[in-house]
């Protein structure tokens, strides 16, 4: 049974969309929605969140529909959750707990599993009295209990110890990630960010040709994936898919996934992927910007990538472009991950960004040094070439690292940096 309790000031269609999204989250978690109840509030009731009369109506509806779980779209305090469970006689959870449950089932890598466990334990700690169960298995045995200590106190301490252990392990993972990023220095890096189910994984799969897991469900993938993308014209980028964002994303979850999202911080540019066919894409865009701001990524250079354009017609596409022009100066491209030919505009935009970062030089290479000439063609952009008897004169755009390697070679002259 789903429960929405929006404020009276919230537009009805927005409140309906939030409840629809909660239904999709429930489906992702493996639940079946048997009904819903909505009450618009001026302020939450401190005892039940809903008004007392509405809470009793909810209890009757739960019994009538034979529901065994109630999910609130709003975040409940530990006391509200406890009071509701005593009244309704079934398990009660809120949106944050549901999202954490989905993340727990979707996490595949050991890092993602640790991040989710950390977020779950931090969420659980203040709610232990309501959700109490024997948690000593976390340490494989109690062994630390003092005289007169209650099981609840023991579990609190065990959870605190486990939280500290997980944070230490995640710091070690973050250090390993930093070493990996350093090994990619010099490569143009792109991070895909966006609302969940905007099509980030599908887009990366089409761009890179790599086999990535894709499913039309919220939070289909949690583990970040980095793939090499051939942009054409001799240009290449490393693109990283990141975890999707959503309304009311639990703060514990954002904090625990911070090391994964460091990939976004190190990126040269963020591709903010938006589902162009979604009626509330503007609200979703704002949610993503808010999370990016929380992660201190609001000022990162961005390109808006409107995906799923195969689902809208020409009139809707033109209206979308007009709306974007009035919103901000951030460049925007319109693509469909299912129509590879539409990705050329995105590739050209990324190629232009790379060109802007390359030094333009005049370089003279002995004609016998075929390796150096091949390096210029492979790792840069050749603008002009003049073949002479003993030398090859090239005008090219080259990364700083390549320039350094070429300067160290005998007989090569570099000048005319613009």
Image (tube, grey):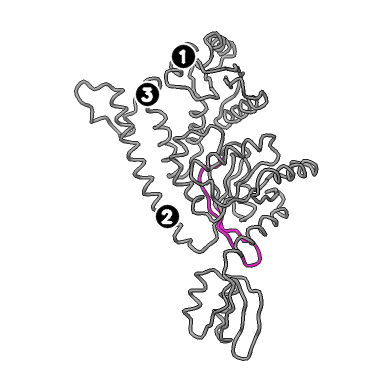
The magenta stretch spans residue 158: no
Residue 340 in sight in this render: yes
**Quadrant of the image containing the N terminus:** top right
Residue 378 in sight in this render: no
Are circles 3 and 2 on residues that touch, CB within 8 Å? Answer: no
Q: Residue at x 49, y 31 (%)?
A: 101
Label 1 to label 3, Cα distance in Å? 18 Å
Vertically, is 295 above or below 58? below
Extreme residue toward the right, this view: 315
Label 1 to label 2, Cα distance in Å? 47 Å
Q: Position of residue 334 (x, y in %)?
A: 70, 49
Q: Which of marks 1 and 2 is nearer the N terminus?
A: 1
**Quadrant of the image containing the C terminus:** bottom right
Q: Where is residue 193 in the image (x, y as percent from the top left)?
A: 57, 46
Q: Please state if 337 lies on the left or on the right of 93 as rendered.
A: right
Q: Earlier in the sequence, mark 3 or mark 2?
A: 3
Q: Where is residue 59 in the image (x, y as percent from the top left)?
A: 54, 11
Which residue occupies the foreground of this view, 327 or 332?
327
Q: Residues within 10 Å of mark 2 (few under 14, many from 20)?
A: some
Extreme residue toward the left, this view: 147
Label 3 to label 2, Cα distance in Å? 36 Å
Q: In which quarter of the image is residue 165?
A: top left
Q: Name the residue under label 2.
A: 178
Name the disc covering residue 339, or none: none
Q: Mark 1 points at which residue?
A: 47
Q: Which residue is drawn at 56% across and 33% down?
A: 247
Q: Name the residue under label 3.
A: 128
**Magenta segment:** 220-239
């Amino acid at each position: 049974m789903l429960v929405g309790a929006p404020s009276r000031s919230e537009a009805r269609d927005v409140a309906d969309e939030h409840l629809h999204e909660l239904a999709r989250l429930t489906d992702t978690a493996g639940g079946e929605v048997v009904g819903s109840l909505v009450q618009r509030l001026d302020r939450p009731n401190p005892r039940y969140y809903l008004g007392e009369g509405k809470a009793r109506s909810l209890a009757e509806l739960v019994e009538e529909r034979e529901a065994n779980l109630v999910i609130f779209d709003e975040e409940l305090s530990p006391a509200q959750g406890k009071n509701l469970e005593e009244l309704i006689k079934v398990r009660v959870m809120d949106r944050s707990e549901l999202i954490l449950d989905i993340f727990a089932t979707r996490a595949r890598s050991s890092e993602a599993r640790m991040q989710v466990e950390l977020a779950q334990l931090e969420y659980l700690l203040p709610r232990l009295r309501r959700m109490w169960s024997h948690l000593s298995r976390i340490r494989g045995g109690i062994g630390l209990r003092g005289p007169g200590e209650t099981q609840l106190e023991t579990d609190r301490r065990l959870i605190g110890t486990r939280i500290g252990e997980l944070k230490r392990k995640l710091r070690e993972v973050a250090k390993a990630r930093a070493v990996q990023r350093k090994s990619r220095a010099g490569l143009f890096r792109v991070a895909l960010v966006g609302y969940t189910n905007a099509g980030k994984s599908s887009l990366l799969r089409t761009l890179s040709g790599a086999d990535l897991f894709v499913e039309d469900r919220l939070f289909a993938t949690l583990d970040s994936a980095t793939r090499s993308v051939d942009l054409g014209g001799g240009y290449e980028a490393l693109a990283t898919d990141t975890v999707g964002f959503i309304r009311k994303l639990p703060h514990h979850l954002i904090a625990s996934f911070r090391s994964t999202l460091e990939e976004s911080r190190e990126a040269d540019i963020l591709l903010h992927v938006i589902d162009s066919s979604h009626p509330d894409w503007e609200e979703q865009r704002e949610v993503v910007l808010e999370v990016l701001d929380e992660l201190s990524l609001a000022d990162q250079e961005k390109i808006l990538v409107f995906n799923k354009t195969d689902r809208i017609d020409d009139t809707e596409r033109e209206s979308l472009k007009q709306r974007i022009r009035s919103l901000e100066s951030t460049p925007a491209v319109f693509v469909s991950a299912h129509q590879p030919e539409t990705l050329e505009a995105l590739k050209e935009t990324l190629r232009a960004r790379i060109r802007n970062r390359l030094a333009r030089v005049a370089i003279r290479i002995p004609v016998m040094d075929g390796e150096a000439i091949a390096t210029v063609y492979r790792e840069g952009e050749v603008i002009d070439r003049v073949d002479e008897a003993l030398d090859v004169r090239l005008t090219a755009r080259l990364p700083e690292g390549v320039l350094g390697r070429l300067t160290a070679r005998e007989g090569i002259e570099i000048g005319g940096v613009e």
